[in-house]
């Protein structure tokens, strides 16, 4: 189970660097800003590692792993929803700016 949790967490941490070149233009950030994300992630991991011994002793290893996986899943869901909403609102703004596209789309303004 620990291997699965560590693999999931490693993959979740790899998502921003992979998406940065594509998503940076949407967010108006430089693709090199992903370095700040990596630094922040490992700083949080360092402090979480300090607290994990106490948490495991108090709540047990399985419960701590479950909460960690839930936190990773919630974080990825928040990012996915934020990206989707941003694209949705950009598309709506584009359709409002060009009435011909709005009429062709069949959507209401």
Image: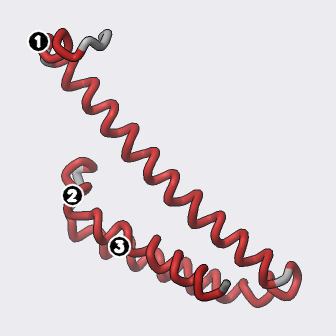
Q: Earlier in the sequence, mark 3 or mark 1?
A: 3
Residue 41: image x %, image y %? 47, 76
Q: Secondary structure at mark 3?
A: helix
**Considering only vertical position in the picture, is 9 above or below 70?**
below
Closer to the chain start, of discs 1 and 2, is 2
- What residue would you read off at disc 1? 100
Relative placement, left or right, of 93 versus 1 is left
**What kind of element bears circle 2?**
helix
- The residue carrying mark 2 is 22
- The residue shown at (59%, 88%) is 3
Identify which residue is drawn at 49% across, 59% down: 76
- Where is 62 relative to 106, above or below? below
Q: Residue furthest right?
A: 58
Task: Give the label, 3 or 1, closer to the camera.
Answer: 1
Work out whether residue 83 or residue 36 is closer to the camera in this orientation and state it. Answer: 83
- Residue 105, by quadrant, is top left
Q: At 54% from the left edge and 59% from the top edge, which residue is drawn? A: 75
Q: Which residue is mark 3?
A: 36
Residue 52: which quarter of the image? bottom right
Marks 3/2 in contact by CB < 8 Å: the verdict is no
Judging depth in this view, the residue of 8 and 56 nearest the camera is 8
C-alpha gap between disc 1 and disc 2: 28 Å
């Amino acid at each position: 189970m620990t291997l699965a949790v560590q693999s999931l967490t490693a993959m979740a941490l790899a998502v921003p660097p992979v998406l940065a070149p594509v998503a940076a233009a949407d967010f108006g950030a430089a693709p090199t800003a992903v370095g700040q994300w990596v630094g922040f992630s490992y700083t949080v991991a360092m402090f979480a590692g300090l607290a994990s011994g106490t948490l495991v002793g108090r709540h047990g290893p399985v419960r701590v792993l479950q909460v960690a996986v839930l936190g990773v899943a919630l974080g990825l869901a928040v990012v996915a929803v934020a990206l989707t909403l941003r694209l949705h609102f950009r598309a709506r703004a584009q359709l409002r700016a060009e009435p011909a596209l709005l009429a062709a789309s069949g959507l209401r303004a």
